[in-house]
Image (cartoon, rainbow, N blue to C red):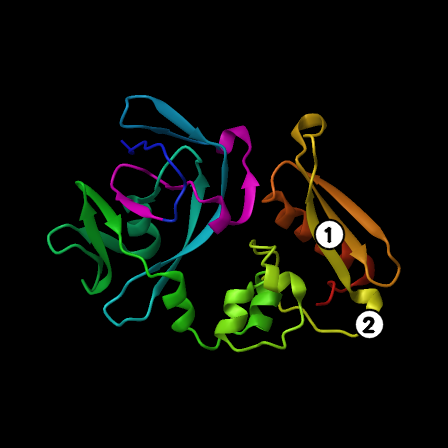
Amino acid sequence: MTVAVRGNAANTWIYDTGSSHHLTPDLDSLTNYHKLAPHEYYIYGTSEGTTATAKSASYTTIYLESPTGKPTALKIKAYYQPNLKYGLLSADRLRTDFNLYGTTKDLTLRDLDTDQTAGYLQISKNITFIRLTEPNRIAAAAPTLNPLLLHRRLGHTGSHNIKLQNHEKFDCEACRLAKAKHLVSRDPISRTADPTELWHTDVQAVTPTGYGGIKYYLIMINNATRLTRIALLHTKAEASQELIKMNSQHKNLVSRYPAA
């Protein structure tokens, strides 16, 4: 059985030997978040003897502490469950997807074939947690991760990474405000000075809540023509899917993606 714990969502993971899939309450860490069809729901048992249902899923990357000091990155599919206090990292999925197993004998995560240590566990209040690196240590371990690359691949990188890389002349206001957190494209996006290829986007709140539970709208404006597109959203997380849709439609119309 998985452990049902109520509280605030946190990017902290329990090494869970009872769940078949990963579960997380941390929506902000998820990329390409999407709701599932009813036949795709993950229904699981809890320690209280009841069942719970996760109705959406996405991907996230966790970084394990390792003996080398270099973070071990694991990209995992996780079901979103806001009622959990901690993420539940499925031991079965770790074994199947990454060939890793955990042992409480020496509190390590090891490779099934070589038995080499890939990460560490720790026990607190009789619960086994995964030891992860801190965000600033991850950034420090990857000095080549420049803001322009993050801007192209992730969205808006945030002032922390700009300062970390000493890119004080990086000229994107939204990057400094870190408005976007979700991955919208893994393809490189070309730079351009052509105003017809540039789009400006933002997410605004709807007050009061609109018909059907609409709480936000995504506005997309072409720099030259001022052509405006609007997408209605129930959550901010839906903005990434709308941007992906817009990128795809733009390429179908003009045979190229919008530029950065």
The part of the chain drawn in magenta is 12-40
- The residue positioned farthest toward the left in the image shown: 105
Q: What is the distance, in whole Å, between disc 2 and disc 1 at their CAs?
A: 19 Å
Q: Which residue is mark 2?
A: 194
Pointer 2 or 1: first along the chain: 2
Pinpoint residue 194: horizontal percent, then vertical percent. Answer: 82, 72
Q: Position of residue 211 (x, y in %)?
A: 72, 26
Counting from the top left corner in percent of width and height, residue 42 is at: 43, 33
Q: Amino acid at mark 2?
A: Asp
The residue under label 1 is 246
Q: Is disc 1 placed on a helix, strand or loop?
A: helix
Is label 2 or label 1 in front? 2
The circle drawn on residue 28 is none
Amino acid on which the number 1 mark rests in the picture: Met
Local secondary structure at mark 2: loop
Q: Is residue 176 left or right of residue 73?
A: right
